[in-house]
Image (cartoon, rainbow, N blue to C red):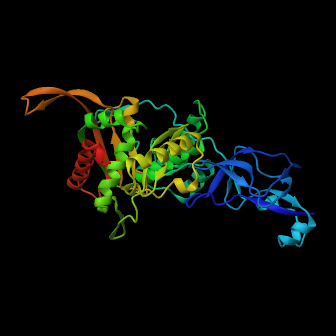
Amino acid sequence: MALVPILMPQLGESIAEATIVRILFQEGDAVQADSDIIEVETNKAVMGVTAPCSGTLGQIFAEAGTSYLVGAVLGSIEVSAEDAKRLGLEEDERPNAGRQEKKRVEKPAVPAAVEPTIKGGLPVPAHAGGASYLSPRMKARMAELGLRAADLSGISASGAGGRVTIEDLERFMAGIERNKTTSASPMRKAVADAMTRSWSRPLATVVRPIQLDNLLAHRKTHPAKPGPALYTLRALAIALGENSAPAGRLIGERIVHPPSVDIAFAVEAEDGVMVPVIRNADQYRLDDLVPRYNRLVDLARQRRLPPGDIGGSIATVTNYGTFGLTIATPIPLPEQTLLIGMGVGQTVPFWNPELEEFVPVVEAQFTLSFDHRVLDGGAAGRLLKRVAELLDSPEQL
């Protein structure tokens, strides 16, 4: 008999590790090639690790709740001598569990309660300037604890020049132990990482009220009853298809224009948000997008989006109006320049110059958050205006 290793695969372009959720077979079970044998969770979705060949499941090194790096040995499959020869295996060599690289999922630090001191009218911890300088010793200790620089922003620094010392950090961590803590899921950690990277850019937001009466009337007559978010996604896709410059990314000294209009949309999932992508959204009519949109929503809620339906988008549409919110300033993903947000629709009075009287209309506040290095307020306003024009004529979508 020969042993074939089961390795943690590369589950996405930017994915370096995944957490074991469930092992679907027992040691000694027969498995078929390409069948899912281990269920893992990445920062984007729940996916399966497949058997590299048919055989009998040997020893499993992987443990549920543990994160493993790409390439780590998760277990082995026993194959016959004939299959071993066909697969090019010459020795009966058990995969070495010692070669695997894994790291335990650490419980995140939850800041201890701090008595606030009033500074400038805002309750903030006194001298909480954060970690402006991190010594090698501090970085090593933070690595041991699984902390990032942003986690130290609430620590009162006592070192020279406002530096956070090791003693400050240890006092902070000791205070944490007195508080209730919960483990952050891979999804929550991924959202935190993405938002931290996004916030490193100068972001701005413009707001425009948009009337939805024509959209809602069109939706009533549509057999599939598409939601306002899909109308907005299609309108944004048309606008960017006409002029892709607003969705360009600043790389060095160049604006890189997107090769295709791939628009993402936000779907609330357990402990986070999934953002599936509709590729080439400018090339399909609204009617054609409805089944694709509905399929992606279902997969996103199950957190089972295929890798091809995640990432690589140029903008996102999010409907925070479903939570009763009128206005918000959501943050685009790190690889995006734009994000359109939709507030809740409300009936408001509108002056009709033809009738010379106020009439009731359904209106929602739309926000466009953008990378201010690429766009200014005028360009952002013109893009939002074009989206408004398209939504006022939904039959064009």
Q: In this rendering, is residue 19 above or below 76?
A: above
Quick check: 201 above or below 155? below
Task: Say whether residue 30 is left or right of residue 188.
Answer: right
x and y, in percent, of residue 191 in the image: 50, 46
Residue situated in front as seen by the camera: 325 or 286:
286
Residue 350 shown left or right of residue 91 in the figure: left
Q: Height in image: 25 above or below 321?
A: below
Residue 127, x across and y down, in percent: 39, 42
Query: Where does residue 98 sit, x and y in percent of width and height?
Result: 80, 59
Q: Nearer the viewer, residue 139 or 95?
A: 95
Q: Is residue 123 left or right of residue 69?
A: left
- Write the residue at 89% across / 49% down: 28
Residue visible at 31% across and 32% down in the picture: 326
Front-most of residues 309 and 65 = 309
Q: Quadrant of residue 119?
A: top left
| Picture residue at 38% right of the left edge, 47% below the top | 286
Question: In which image quadrant can residue 170 be found?
Answer: top right
> Which residue is at a point 61% across and 58% down the rendered structure image?
16
Where the N terminus falls, by quadrant? Answer: bottom right
